[in-house]
Image (cartoon, helix red, strand yellow):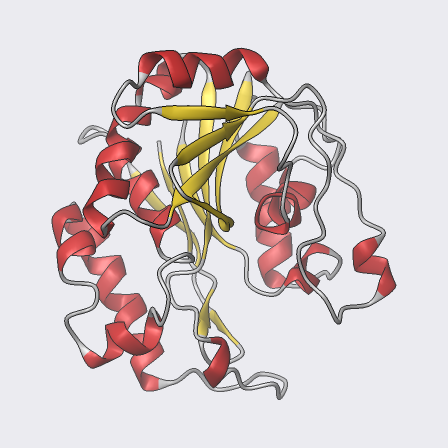
Amino acid sequence: MPALFLGHGSPMNAIETNNFTQTLTNLGASLPRPKAILMISAHWETNGTWVTGMERPKTIHDFYGFPKALFDVQYPAPGSPEFAKKVSSTILSPKIEIDENHWGLDHGTWSVLKHMFPEADIPVFQMSIDKTKPIEFHLELGQKLNFLREQGVMIIGSGNIVHNLRQVRWEQEAKPFDWAIEFDEWIKQKLIERDFNSLAKDALSTTAGKFSIPTLEHYLPLLYIAGASENKDLLKFEYEGIQMGSMSMRCLRFF
Protein backbone atom coordinates (compact mmCIF):
# COMPACT_ATOMS: atom_id res chain seq x y z
CA MET A 1 0.00 0.00 0.00
CA PRO A 2 1.16 3.56 -0.60
CA ALA A 3 2.02 5.98 2.20
CA LEU A 4 0.74 9.52 1.77
CA PHE A 5 1.11 12.93 3.33
CA LEU A 6 -1.80 15.29 2.75
CA GLY A 7 -2.07 18.97 3.52
CA HIS A 8 -5.53 19.63 4.95
CA GLY A 9 -5.58 23.36 5.68
CA SER A 10 -8.83 25.01 6.70
CA PRO A 11 -11.67 22.73 7.84
CA MET A 12 -13.77 24.48 5.16
CA ASN A 13 -11.98 22.38 2.54
CA ALA A 14 -14.19 19.53 3.75
CA ILE A 15 -17.29 21.11 2.22
CA GLU A 16 -15.81 23.24 -0.56
CA THR A 17 -15.00 22.35 -4.13
CA ASN A 18 -11.68 23.74 -5.33
CA ASN A 19 -8.52 22.59 -7.10
CA PHE A 20 -7.22 21.01 -3.90
CA THR A 21 -10.37 19.03 -3.07
CA GLN A 22 -10.73 17.92 -6.68
CA THR A 23 -7.18 16.58 -6.48
CA LEU A 24 -8.16 14.55 -3.41
CA THR A 25 -11.20 13.16 -5.23
CA ASN A 26 -9.12 12.12 -8.23
CA LEU A 27 -6.41 10.69 -5.98
CA GLY A 28 -8.87 8.54 -4.07
CA ALA A 29 -10.25 7.13 -7.31
CA SER A 30 -6.74 6.17 -8.48
CA LEU A 31 -5.52 4.45 -5.31
CA PRO A 32 -5.72 0.72 -4.58
CA ARG A 33 -8.38 -0.19 -2.05
CA PRO A 34 -6.78 -0.86 1.34
CA LYS A 35 -7.93 -3.25 4.07
CA ALA A 36 -7.73 -0.30 6.47
CA ILE A 37 -6.34 3.23 6.72
CA LEU A 38 -4.06 4.41 9.52
CA MET A 39 -4.36 8.18 9.90
CA ILE A 40 -1.82 10.31 11.74
CA SER A 41 -3.51 13.68 12.17
CA ALA A 42 -2.07 16.94 13.47
CA HIS A 43 -5.12 17.26 15.69
CA TRP A 44 -4.61 14.39 18.12
CA GLU A 45 -1.76 15.23 20.48
CA THR A 46 -1.26 13.14 23.61
CA ASN A 47 1.18 12.12 26.31
CA GLY A 48 2.41 8.79 25.03
CA THR A 49 1.33 7.19 21.76
CA TRP A 50 -2.20 5.86 21.27
CA VAL A 51 -4.21 4.19 18.53
CA THR A 52 -7.99 4.20 18.32
CA GLY A 53 -9.42 0.72 18.83
CA MET A 54 -13.17 1.26 18.80
CA GLU A 55 -15.52 -0.47 16.34
CA ARG A 56 -17.34 2.75 15.43
CA PRO A 57 -15.23 5.88 15.85
CA LYS A 58 -17.22 9.07 16.22
CA THR A 59 -16.83 12.07 13.92
CA ILE A 60 -15.15 14.82 15.97
CA HIS A 61 -15.81 18.48 15.12
CA ASP A 62 -12.70 19.89 16.79
CA PHE A 63 -13.04 23.55 15.78
CA TYR A 64 -15.33 26.50 16.38
CA GLY A 65 -16.66 29.54 14.55
CA PHE A 66 -17.43 27.74 11.29
CA PRO A 67 -20.78 27.35 9.46
CA LYS A 68 -23.35 24.82 10.65
CA ALA A 69 -22.90 22.86 7.42
CA LEU A 70 -19.41 21.91 8.56
CA PHE A 71 -20.64 20.72 11.96
CA ASP A 72 -23.28 18.64 10.21
CA VAL A 73 -20.67 16.55 8.36
CA GLN A 74 -20.44 12.94 9.50
CA TYR A 75 -17.87 10.40 8.34
CA PRO A 76 -19.22 7.07 9.65
CA ALA A 77 -16.31 4.83 8.65
CA PRO A 78 -15.86 1.70 10.76
CA GLY A 79 -12.82 1.41 13.00
CA SER A 80 -10.21 -1.33 12.89
CA PRO A 81 -9.72 -2.88 16.34
CA GLU A 82 -7.84 -5.73 14.64
CA PHE A 83 -5.10 -3.52 13.21
CA ALA A 84 -5.01 -1.33 16.31
CA LYS A 85 -4.17 -4.42 18.35
CA LYS A 86 -1.62 -5.51 15.75
CA VAL A 87 0.19 -2.15 15.98
CA SER A 88 0.16 -2.29 19.77
CA SER A 89 1.46 -5.88 19.91
CA THR A 90 4.07 -5.51 17.13
CA ILE A 91 5.69 -2.24 18.18
CA LEU A 92 6.95 -2.71 21.73
CA SER A 93 9.05 0.46 21.97
CA PRO A 94 7.48 2.90 22.38
CA LYS A 95 4.53 1.27 24.12
CA ILE A 96 1.41 2.01 22.11
CA GLU A 97 -1.82 2.18 24.08
CA ILE A 98 -5.26 1.41 22.64
CA ASP A 99 -7.99 4.02 23.06
CA GLU A 100 -11.39 2.33 23.04
CA ASN A 101 -13.73 5.20 23.91
CA HIS A 102 -12.09 8.65 24.01
CA TRP A 103 -11.09 9.86 20.54
CA GLY A 104 -12.51 9.10 17.11
CA LEU A 105 -11.92 10.70 13.71
CA ASP A 106 -10.95 14.37 13.97
CA HIS A 107 -11.17 16.89 11.14
CA GLY A 108 -7.57 16.27 10.10
CA THR A 109 -8.81 12.82 9.16
CA TRP A 110 -12.35 13.17 7.86
CA SER A 111 -11.89 16.45 6.00
CA VAL A 112 -9.57 14.71 3.52
CA LEU A 113 -11.07 11.18 3.56
CA LYS A 114 -14.50 12.65 2.79
CA HIS A 115 -13.19 13.60 -0.67
CA MET A 116 -10.98 10.57 -1.25
CA PHE A 117 -13.31 7.82 -0.04
CA PRO A 118 -16.77 9.42 0.16
CA GLU A 119 -18.55 6.12 0.85
CA ALA A 120 -16.81 5.92 4.27
CA ASP A 121 -16.71 2.14 3.90
CA ILE A 122 -13.00 1.52 4.55
CA PRO A 123 -11.99 0.90 8.19
CA VAL A 124 -10.08 3.86 9.66
CA PHE A 125 -8.02 4.08 12.83
CA GLN A 126 -5.91 6.96 14.11
CA MET A 127 -2.54 7.19 15.80
CA SER A 128 -1.83 10.09 18.14
CA ILE A 129 1.23 12.32 18.19
CA ASP A 130 3.20 12.17 21.43
CA LYS A 131 3.81 15.85 22.13
CA THR A 132 6.50 15.08 24.72
CA LYS A 133 8.95 13.55 22.23
CA PRO A 134 11.68 15.14 20.06
CA ILE A 135 11.25 15.41 16.30
CA GLU A 136 13.48 12.40 15.56
CA PHE A 137 11.16 10.14 17.57
CA HIS A 138 8.37 10.57 15.03
CA LEU A 139 10.56 9.69 12.05
CA GLU A 140 11.72 6.54 13.85
CA LEU A 141 8.18 5.51 14.78
CA GLY A 142 7.18 5.96 11.16
CA GLN A 143 9.86 3.44 10.21
CA LYS A 144 8.35 0.94 12.64
CA LEU A 145 4.93 1.38 11.03
CA ASN A 146 6.22 0.33 7.61
CA PHE A 147 5.17 -3.31 8.17
CA LEU A 148 1.52 -2.28 7.88
CA ARG A 149 1.92 -1.43 4.21
CA GLU A 150 2.68 -5.08 3.41
CA GLN A 151 -0.49 -6.09 5.25
CA GLY A 152 -2.82 -3.94 3.20
CA VAL A 153 -2.93 -0.83 5.39
CA MET A 154 -2.64 2.60 3.77
CA ILE A 155 -0.77 5.03 6.03
CA ILE A 156 -1.77 8.68 5.70
CA GLY A 157 -0.32 11.68 7.52
CA SER A 158 -2.52 14.77 7.60
CA GLY A 159 -1.11 18.17 8.50
CA ASN A 160 0.61 21.04 6.67
CA ILE A 161 4.30 21.51 5.87
CA VAL A 162 3.85 25.26 6.31
CA HIS A 163 1.21 26.19 8.89
CA ASN A 164 1.31 29.66 10.46
CA LEU A 165 -2.16 30.83 11.48
CA ARG A 166 -0.90 34.15 12.83
CA GLN A 167 0.30 35.11 9.35
CA VAL A 168 -2.83 34.03 7.44
CA ARG A 169 -3.93 36.35 4.63
CA TRP A 170 -7.70 36.18 4.27
CA GLU A 171 -8.10 37.81 0.87
CA GLN A 172 -8.94 35.67 -2.16
CA GLU A 173 -5.89 34.40 -4.09
CA ALA A 174 -3.59 35.67 -1.35
CA LYS A 175 0.07 35.85 -2.35
CA PRO A 176 2.27 33.35 -0.48
CA PHE A 177 4.92 34.71 1.85
CA ASP A 178 8.48 34.34 0.55
CA TRP A 179 9.46 32.32 3.62
CA ALA A 180 6.55 29.92 3.03
CA ILE A 181 7.67 29.31 -0.55
CA GLU A 182 11.30 28.90 0.55
CA PHE A 183 10.54 26.31 3.22
CA ASP A 184 8.02 24.37 1.14
CA GLU A 185 10.58 24.08 -1.66
CA TRP A 186 13.32 23.06 0.79
CA ILE A 187 11.13 20.25 2.06
CA LYS A 188 10.35 19.17 -1.50
CA GLN A 189 14.05 18.95 -2.32
CA LYS A 190 14.90 16.98 0.83
CA LEU A 191 12.12 14.51 0.02
CA ILE A 192 13.41 14.07 -3.52
CA GLU A 193 16.92 13.49 -2.15
CA ARG A 194 15.55 11.07 0.48
CA ASP A 195 17.39 13.18 3.06
CA PHE A 196 14.89 12.48 5.80
CA ASN A 197 17.35 13.11 8.62
CA SER A 198 17.45 16.77 7.59
CA LEU A 199 13.67 16.91 7.87
CA ALA A 200 14.09 16.02 11.54
CA LYS A 201 17.30 17.85 12.43
CA ASP A 202 17.35 20.98 10.27
CA ALA A 203 13.72 22.04 9.81
CA LEU A 204 13.93 24.73 12.48
CA SER A 205 17.46 25.88 11.65
CA THR A 206 16.41 28.73 9.34
CA THR A 207 14.17 31.76 9.66
CA ALA A 208 11.89 30.32 6.99
CA GLY A 209 11.59 27.08 8.96
CA LYS A 210 10.79 28.87 12.20
CA PHE A 211 8.06 30.93 10.53
CA SER A 212 6.67 27.86 8.76
CA ILE A 213 6.58 25.66 11.88
CA PRO A 214 5.67 27.89 14.84
CA THR A 215 4.33 24.73 16.49
CA LEU A 216 5.19 21.16 15.52
CA GLU A 217 1.86 19.33 15.33
CA HIS A 218 1.09 20.04 11.66
CA TYR A 219 4.63 19.22 10.56
CA LEU A 220 5.16 15.92 12.39
CA PRO A 221 2.73 13.78 10.33
CA LEU A 222 5.12 14.26 7.39
CA LEU A 223 7.88 12.54 9.34
CA TYR A 224 5.76 9.44 9.96
CA ILE A 225 5.21 9.12 6.20
CA ALA A 226 8.87 9.70 5.37
CA GLY A 227 9.74 7.05 7.94
CA ALA A 228 7.21 4.57 6.55
CA SER A 229 8.59 4.94 3.02
CA GLU A 230 11.15 2.63 1.42
CA ASN A 231 14.15 3.36 -0.80
CA LYS A 232 12.49 1.50 -3.68
CA ASP A 233 9.36 3.67 -3.50
CA LEU A 234 8.50 6.13 -6.19
CA LEU A 235 7.67 9.65 -4.95
CA LYS A 236 4.90 11.69 -6.53
CA PHE A 237 3.80 15.17 -5.54
CA GLU A 238 0.03 15.06 -5.97
CA TYR A 239 -0.65 18.72 -5.19
CA GLU A 240 1.46 21.83 -4.73
CA GLY A 241 0.21 25.22 -3.62
CA ILE A 242 -0.03 27.62 -0.70
CA GLN A 243 -3.41 28.80 0.59
CA MET A 244 -3.96 31.97 2.60
CA GLY A 245 -0.33 33.01 2.19
CA SER A 246 0.99 30.83 5.01
CA MET A 247 -0.43 27.32 4.59
CA SER A 248 1.21 24.80 2.28
CA MET A 249 -1.28 22.33 0.85
CA ARG A 250 1.42 20.06 -0.59
CA CYS A 251 0.30 16.44 -0.90
CA LEU A 252 2.61 13.56 -1.79
CA ARG A 253 2.66 9.82 -2.15
CA PHE A 254 5.30 7.12 -1.73
CA PHE A 255 4.31 4.01 -3.67
* Outermost residue to the front: 47
Where is the C terminus found, in terms of image quarters? top left
**55 displayed left or right of 138:** right
Vertical order, 15 against 85 (above or below): below
Image location of residue 41, percent across then percent down: 49, 46
Pick the front one: 170 or 65: 65
Image location of residue 254, percent across then percent down: 34, 37
Vertical order, 122 against 151 (above or below): below
Image location of residue 110, percent across then percent down: 65, 44
Vertical order, 242 against 119 (above or below): below
**233 displayed left or right of 148:** left
Pick the front one: 6 or 234: 6
Q: How many badges with numbers are in the image?
A: 0
Task: Work out whether residue 32 can be spotted.
Answer: no
Task: Work out whether residue 70 can be spotted.
Answer: yes
Q: Quadrant of residue 199?
A: bottom left
Q: Residue at x 36, y 57 (%)?
A: 219
Image location of residue 25, percent across then percent down: 64, 45
Vertical order, 9 against 129 (above or below): below
Q: Residue at x 55, y 16 (%)?
A: 35
Q: Residue at x 66, y 35 (%)?
A: 117
Q: Residue at x 86, y 62 (%)?
A: 68
Where is the N terminus found, in terms of image quarters? top left
Pick the front one: 225 or 50: 50
